[in-house]
Image: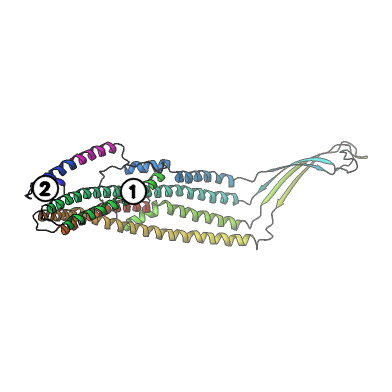
Amino acid sequence: MVSLKNNYRLGRSYNELSLLQQCKTLLTVATFFLGAESLFAAEVNSVALSENLAVTIAVSDNPNLAEVNERYKALLDVPSQVGALPDPMVSLNAMNFPTDTFSRDQEPMTQLQVGISQVFPFPGKLGLKEEAAEYEATAAGHSVDEVRLQLVKNVKSKWWQLYYLDRALETIKNNQALLRQFITVAQTKYETGKGLQQDVLLAQLELSKLLDQEIQLEALRRNQAIKLNILMDRAANEVIVLPEQVARSMPDVADENVLYQQAESSRPLLKKMESKVEAARSRLDLAERDFYPDFKLGVTYGDRTGDNPPPMGGARSDFFSVMVGVKVPLYAGRKQSKAVSQRSSELQMNRYALIDEKSMVMAAISSAVTDYQEAKQQFSLYGTGIVPQAQQTVQSMLAGYQVSEVDFLNLVRSQMTLFNYELQYWKALSNAKQALARLEAAVGEETVYE
């Protein structure tokens, strides 16, 4: 961007003393405000929210991540429950009491019983239930990792969007200052009879456009700050100040095939889907084993009172009973066989879902690599070629305008073109960093570089 100092140096070739004096005044005022702005920036940078700090806060405080983590903890307690035997049943019975007297001594079969019974599923069923639950808990653990991965990606993306908006607003303010200087120069030339009033009006119009764009960007920045605050579990209206200087390095990423392999072994989402497949396979095995019966074993002790009649005589003996029950799969055609069919379809469903998810992950990797390479090349092109060339063009135009060799319209157009190129420069940086964040999330780890 053309600095005020460069404009002042070029302005010395202009002969009107009043114009030179006004330029000196503008330079003094601009220097004062730029100095004040630098002091303010130095002060806020001490509490600036860096990208890493934003990620750390979000991972620590985000309620959605905490919710998924608590669900995982809950599912960890399920396997031991479903793998345990059903609770035994204790029974107390009053047997064969005569209805005329309800006496315990009247009838020999009258007794008070206490018993206990236990259901024993067919061998292997409990183990399969526990195995399926363990796979489900493992899948929930991978869900925690996946949510954390997506949270980090979203935080980084919002952070870089905010950074771009900060730089865009800074660029707009600098261009506003230059346009105000253009207006001053145009007014002076008009007042001395060497310029046109339409030049002044044109510069004022472009300044008004920049003011309107500043209003829009300020509102957009506030909305992005709200979203970032929510991700960090902060108050929506909390002020976010970002550092002005950041690393602009653009590392080379690994080959796409290498990234595919990394994703297959590292992406939590794929691990989750694989655990879902294993859980479905265990439930299918359990459904097939449901054709085999469960057993029920029970024992009772019956307490009797009174004496036996002659000729046996003597006190009545207590009773001890053993009971064995077998659950018969009598309706296997309507129940067990249908359950096997259901579980088989669920297993296939999870297998297809895994294949589909792998395809989507690979597509996300390729898309992120493409976006990163595009933004990286644009960033280099704007930074080393287009922006410096546009700066030189503006300087040349300004020098030509001050000696009436270039019309004001072309000068303003060249400055606005430079302005747009500067915005594209910062946009390319932001897009590249956001693409890297998406790539890291798609692969499942941060080691995506060569």
Callout count? 2
Q: Is residue 385 visible?
A: no
Query: Which quadrant would residue 379 be assigned to in this image?
Result: bottom left
Residue at position x 22%, y 38% in the image? 36
For residue 278, above or below residue 101: below
Kind of residue at badge 2: Leu
Q: Position of residue 243 (x, y in %)?
A: 28, 42
In magenta, the rendered stretch is: 31-48
In this orientation, which residue lies closer to the viewer: 450 or 216? 216
> Separation of disc 2 and disc 1 at Cα?
38 Å
For residue 3, above or below residue 260: above
Kind of residue at badge 1: Arg
For residue 50, above or below residue 366: above
Q: Residues within 10 Å of mark 2 (few under 14, many from 20)?
A: many
Q: Position of residue 297 (x, y in %)?
A: 70, 47
Q: Position of residue 196 (x, y in %)?
A: 15, 57
Q: Which residue is mark 1?
A: 221
- 33 relative to 233 in the view: left or right: left
Residue 23 has which mark? none
Residue 19 has which mark? 2
Asked which secondary structure carries label 2, the reply is helix
Q: Position of residue 55 (x, y in %)?
A: 36, 44
Q: Is residue 383 visible?
A: yes
Of callouts 2 and 1, which one flags the residue occurring earlier in the amino acid sequence?
2
In this orientation, which residue lies closer to the viewer: 119 or 62? 62
